[in-house]
Image (tube, rainbow, N blue to C red):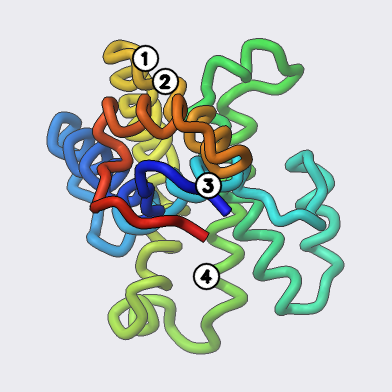
Amino acid sequence: MKTGRPIHRESLFDFFSSRVQDASQRRGASLSAPTTTYLTQLLTRLGEEGTVLPKDAPRTLAELHLQARDAPRPRALRLYRALGDHALATSGYFAESLSRRAVGRRYYADMGGAAYARVVDLSTSGPISKAAEIDPWIRAFVELGLRFDDCVALLSDIAERDRAEGTDDLLRLFQEWERTGSEHAARRLAELGALPSRGPTELA
């Protein structure tokens, strides 16, 4: 049981939604609403779980690709989406980590864009353009695949702003609060405007 100032997960979504919208306007990215929502959800998952990868998924892009290629369609869809998300989060929000890796941003962009395109292929049986008109999530995956570099730049912009404003520890603080219920973490999150209080109630 966590007690103290109540924190709500939807507040983290609202925080990142504002970040994505601001970055889109600054960059003139003009991404579709489904894509901006998807990017917001991706950042929120990072805040809640510390990763965008499922627990049973491999940790590298190459392993994800190999497993997805040979998997039945439902699992392949999940693994290709995880591959795209992992490549996007790493090359976008955590771009500095690539300086310590043997492969660079271009490799992540190629793998990530191709993975989202594969999600579209596996999700549609007819013309992709018609499916994208009907299903907003298909439209998001089409755009994520075609404009992967734009999405990376947008997440990089958000990360740079967070560092400049001293909010780059936001994800770590949220994970600490989720894990321990730390009042210090909750107070700092509220100060950053990420998780506002909504009254003196207990959290389960």
Residue 14: in sight, yes or no?
yes
The answer to whether the residues at label 4 and label 1 have Cβ atoms under 8 Å apart is: no
Question: Is 55 rendered above or below residue 104?
Answer: below
Q: Where is residue 194 drawn, in percent x and y? A: 30, 37
**Amino acid of disc 2:** Asp
User: Which residue lies under the disc numbered 3?
Assistant: 48
**Between marks 2 and 3, how big is the CA–CA gap?**
15 Å
Say which label, 2 or 3, has the lower sequence index.
3
**Amino acid of disc 3:** Glu
User: Which residue lies under the disc numbered 4?
Assistant: 120
User: Which residue lies under the disc numbered 1?
Assistant: 163
Please give left or right for residue 70 compared with residue 8 in the image: right
> Could you say whether the residue bearing mark 2 is in a helix, strand or loop?
loop
Please give left or right for residue 142 compared with residue 62 in the image: left
Quadrant location of residue 43? top left
**Between marks 4 and 3, how big is the CA–CA gap?**
26 Å
- Front disc: 4 or 1: 1
**Between marks 1 and 3, how big is the CA–CA gap?**
19 Å
- Front disc: 4 or 3: 3
> Could you say whether the residue bearing mark 3 is in a helix, strand or loop?
helix
Residues 44 and 72: in front is 44
Question: Is 122 rendered above or below residue 17?
Answer: below
Question: Is 117 rendered above or below residue 51?
Answer: below
User: Which residue lies under the disc numbered 2?
Assistant: 168
> Could you say whether the residue bearing mark 1 is in a helix, strand or loop?
helix
